[in-house]
Image (cartoon, grey):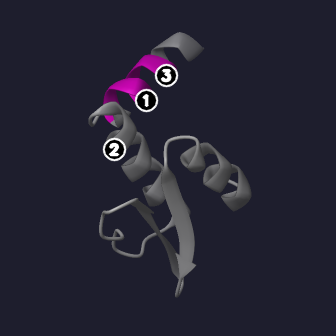
Amino acid sequence: MFKVNEIKSWAGKYGVSVKKQGEGYVWFSEGKEPSASCSIEDVVEQIFNHITGDKYKQHQKDYKSNES
């Protein structure tokens, strides 16, 4: 499980803000509309994709293959 303060710190390094909204969280970068409210896990995946050009699934695949 992700700690929200750690995610906010990590995202901030890339110019992305994370805020609580209702039951979930939204993220946005300067000049962009906020995302839809979603779980913190989904926020992490979306921000990672934003930063890396949609490489989240490849990263997870590589990570799991390196675990073995």
Give whichever of discs 3 and 2 has the lower sequence position: 2
Give whichever of discs 2 and 1 has the lower sequence position: 2
Q: Residue at x 46, y 14 (%)?
A: 65
Label 2 secondary element: helix
The region drawn magenta spans 57-63
Badge 3, how many Cα within 10 Å: few under 14, some, many 20+? few
List the residue tagged with mark 3.
64
In contact (CB < 8 Å): disc 2 and disc 1 = no
Q: Is residue 46 above or below residue 18?
A: above
Q: Percent from the top left, x then y, of residue 52?
A: 35, 32
Label 3 secondary element: helix
Q: Residue at x 45, y 64 (%)?
A: 27
Left or right, 41 with respect to 38, comes to right
**Which dot marks residue 60?**
1
Whether residue 60 appears in magenta in the rendering, the answer is yes
Q: Which corner quadrant holds the C terminus?
A: top right
Is 3 or 17 nearer to us in this picture?
17
Badge 1, how many Cα within 10 Å: few under 14, some, many 20+? few
List the residue tagged with mark 2.
50
Q: In 3D space, how far apart are the residues under numbered discs 3 and 2 (Cα atoms)?
A: 21 Å
Give the foreground label among 3 and 1.
Answer: 1
**Which dot marks residue 48?**
none
Q: In 3D space, how far apart are the residues under numbered discs 3 and 1 (Cα atoms)?
A: 6 Å
